[in-house]
Image (cartoon, grey):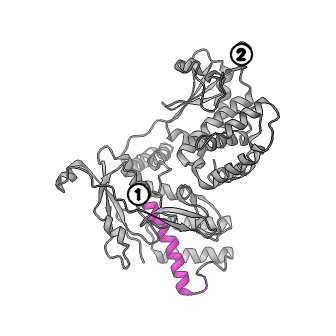
Amino acid sequence: MSVRYGSLPFAEAIEFLKQKIDLATDHWDDIRGEENDHSFIVAGAAKADLLADLHGAVLKGLAQGTTIAEFIRDFEAAVATHGWTGWTGSDTAQGRAWRTATIYETNLRTSYQAGRRAQHVAGAAQRPYLQYHHADGSIHPRPLHVSWNGKILAADDPWWDSHYTPNGWGCRCYVTSLADRDMKRLGKTGPDPTPDDGTYVHKDRQGREHVLPAGIDYGWDHAPGATRNLVKEVQAKAAGLPGEIGRDLLRDIDLPAAPRSKVGMTAGTAIPHAQLVRDAYQAMTQRRRTVVEDAGIRIVAARRITDEMPQWQGVTPRGYPPGMTWDHASGTTTRDGRIIIPQETLVGTGADARWKPLSEELTRGALSHEIAHVLDRVLGVSQQQRFRAAWAADIARAAQQVPADLEAARDLAYFSQAIPAGPIESWAEIVARLDGGRTAQGLDALQVLARTAAIARTIIANLHL
């Protein structure tokens, strides 16, 4: 087997592979879907130094165009140096050749396609159609992959979310983009009907069932790079390089540089509050801030939420009890991409309502909570099956206990909202608590949602969030 690509290397593909975090796993499907966009794994490789060497060897192949033979030499050297034995395929020469080729080709192929997808997404306004191609010369062609050959769909058709190539082990299918003039040349006035080939159920090694689109291998029902903005990652890197080098890197993607978001303040806001919000944001990891900035989010320190959103006066937020309004909230994210952190909120209701400055703990917690919502929209944490299962178990256990007071009862009701709201808010509050802040004032999410918090800790650590 050999990997054949057109114009390697190119910046988006290299960035996709380079920025992955080395993650020790026992099995190849310990992580799936979007987690693969952020993690470099070699099943069974548990030592950090070993993973780093293997990651470097694959990256060299992508960046320098080295051959599979050179990768095998690098792989064998890393295995010998770090004393890795007993790995799948290690017993025979044929097995070693198969395993090294699988590692090398899978990583190169997915990185290349992630980079191409990033370019397709960035250029969708000029080339709004994508065409599926089945690779010629396949020894064992998959019938459905053959049936998709030549299909043209809109670039934003949801079908691509699960069918953007590659679609299985050894799959060499690929996707190209088309402009209106290309469609005219092909004699087409619009896209083809979206294929509907049904689904099938795969049972994994732990007995869990996964419903997958027909024709897509287990673990491959995800468009590579979909949870990352590779064009903006390259632009950000170019901005920090010396003039000509940075321009050369940008020339490879030929797109304008994107603005970075800032922390701002509005009229009537006390400077110490704005500085606290800025400091809390700057204390977050670079990776977390990059996700926020790539999403185009602006952070605003304000006097009150309804100063910025007057149309929300008197409105009860989702999950809040009657009588409470947006002026009781310690933070929010608006539809136009602003995270608003107020310096004061209402406490109490009715005749007992009064304005109170937001404490430092609540300010930090509110910012972490709202940024966690941004992370969730990008990474889909609260939608993951294992996260929701842990959340359901935690909520069921908590429901058997009587809350200590009214605040605790309100918090439990907030965490217990029906899916999707419950898992979404639980994830956000867990992140706030892990950052040393909070928005819930009656219950500690790390205790009440202990199983869910354990999964959140793992995700945050693995993705360096």
| Residue position for label 1 | 10
* Residue at 28% in and 62% down: 150
The residue at the point 56 percent across, 60 percent down is: 32
At which x and y percent is residue 177? 31, 54
Nearest the eye: 87 or 190: 190
Q: Secondary structure at mark 1?
A: loop
Q: Is residue 361 left or right of residue 222?
A: right
The residue sitting at the right extreme is: 404
The image quarter containing residue 27 is bottom right
**Looking at the image, is 97 positioned above or below residue 391?**
below
Mark number displayed over residue 353:
2
Estimate how packed mark 2 is, as few (under 14), some (14 to 19) or many (20 or more) residues with alpha carbons within 10 Å: few
Look at the image and tell me whether residue 284 can be seen. Answer: no
Residue 140 disc label: none
Closer to us: mark 1 or mark 2? Answer: 2
Please state the extent of the stretch shown in magenta in the rendering. 89-113
Tell me which residue sits at (38%, 78%) in the image: 140
* Horizontal relation, residue 380 to residue 229: left or right: right
- Specify whether residue 339 is painted magenta: no
Please state which amino acid type lies under the numbered disc 2.
Ala
| Front one among 43 and 439 | 439
Residue 448, image x, y percentages: 76, 44
Relative horizontal placement of residue 82, taking residue 8 as reference (left or right): right
* Dot 1 amino acid type: Phe
- Number of numbered markers: 2
Principal SS element in the magenta part? helix
Relative side of 296 to 77, left or right: left
